[in-house]
Amino acid sequence: MELIALRCGDLRTDVGGLVGRRASGVVADVPIMAFAVDTGDGVVVFDTGMHEACCGPDPRAHFGRMSDVFELRCPRHALVDERLRQAGHAADEVRWVTNSHLHFDHAGRNGAFPAATQLVRARERAWAVARAGDGRGFLAGDLAAVADTPWDYDGEHELVPGVVLRDAPGHTPGHQVLDVHFDGGRRFVCIGDAAYTLAAVHDATPTGAPADAAQAVATLVSLRAAADAGATLLTAHDVDQWHDVADVATVHRA
Ligand SMILES: [Zn+2]
C-alpha cells in the first residue's frame, strides 16, 4: 500500500486572515494538498483540489468572490489528475474519489475521474448545495461534477481493510478524514480542513470559520488523541508541513 501527497497548487493569501480571520500582513503561498492511496485493491483519491478554471483566462467566472479573497495559483500541471499522473497513476486507475468536504479547494476536480465511484456524503452535499455561490467556499460549478448518488454513513466507513473514512464534523457538517493504517503499524490521518495547521490541532483551536465550533473542537481533540497515540496527521494547508513538497511525494509505502 502507498500513501501519496499531491500538491495541487496554492492559495496566495494573508495567512492571518486564513487562520485567525484577522489580517497579519504576512502573505504566503498556502498549499492545497490532496492525497491518494494505492490500496492494492484500487486507488482512492481524497480531495480533488481546484477546478481547471483556475488555469484559464477568467477564473472569476468560476470562482467568483473566492478569486478576490485568494490569489489562485494552480498551473495545469498542478491539477489533481496531473499530479496523480506524475506520481505514476492514470486517472482511470482511480476506483474511488471522496472529499474531506466540498469547498472549492477540495472538490474542484471530482469530474476528472469519470471511471471512479464518488463517495460524497449526502449531508455534506445538501449543506453545500444550499450554500453554493454565497461567497463562503461552495461553488455551483464544482458541485455540478459532484455525484448526487445517495450515500452516507455514521461514525466510520471502511473502504478496504486499513483505509477508513471517519466522521470529523465542525468545519462543515459532513466533514470527514481519511485514516490509513499500514502493515507494520504506521498510521496516517489526512485531516482535511479539521484544522489548517498542526499547531491548531495541538491547541484544539479551530481555524477559519467552522460551521459548528463545538463540533470542530471535539474533532480536534480526537485528532490530537490519535496523534498522541502515534498517528501522523497530514494537513491540507499547513505551510510548514509541506514546504519541501513542490509537486508529489510518497508519504509512506508498506
Ligand atoms: Zn481548504
Image: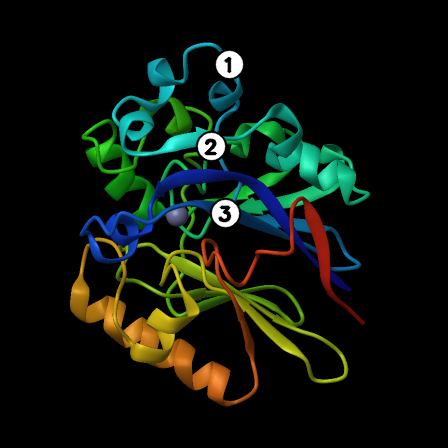
Residue behind mark 3 = 31
Q: Residues within 10 Å of mark 2 (few under 14, many from 20)?
A: many
Q: Which label sits on residue 56?
A: 1
Q: Residue at x 24, y 49 (%)?
A: 17
Please, what secondary structure does the residue beneath circle 1 have? Answer: loop
Q: Which residue sits at x=64%, y=56%?
A: 244
As shown in the figure, which amino acid type bears the numbered disc 2? Gly
Which amino acid, mark 3? Pro
Where does the image place residue 30, in percent across and percent down from the top left? 45, 47
**Residue 83 % position (x, y):** 68, 38
Return the residue found at the far bottom: 229
Q: Dividing the picture into quarters, in which one does residue 78 lie?
A: top right
Cα–Cα gap, marks 1 and 3: 20 Å
Task: Please indicate whether residue 14 sits to the left or right of residue 87 in the image.
Answer: left
Q: First in sequence: mark 3 or mark 2? A: 3
Q: Which residue is mark 2?
A: 108
Q: Is mark 1 within 8 Å of ligand 1?
A: no
Q: Nearer the viewer, mark 1 or mark 2?
A: 1
- Between marks 3 and 2, how big is the CA–CA gap? 15 Å
| Residue 180 in which image quadrant | bottom right
**Which residue shows up at 35% across the image and 46% down it?**
122
Report the quarter where the N terminus lies.
bottom right
Q: Earlier in the sequence, mark 1 or mark 2?
A: 1
Q: Quadrant of the C terminus?
A: bottom right
Give whichever of discs 1 and 3 has the lower sequence position.
3
Tell whether label 2 touches label 1 (CB within 8 Å): no
Residue drawn 26% across the image and 65% down it: 206
* Circle 1 Cα neighbour tier, 10 Å, few/some/many (<14 / 14–19 / ≥20): some
Residue toward you, 218 or 251: 251
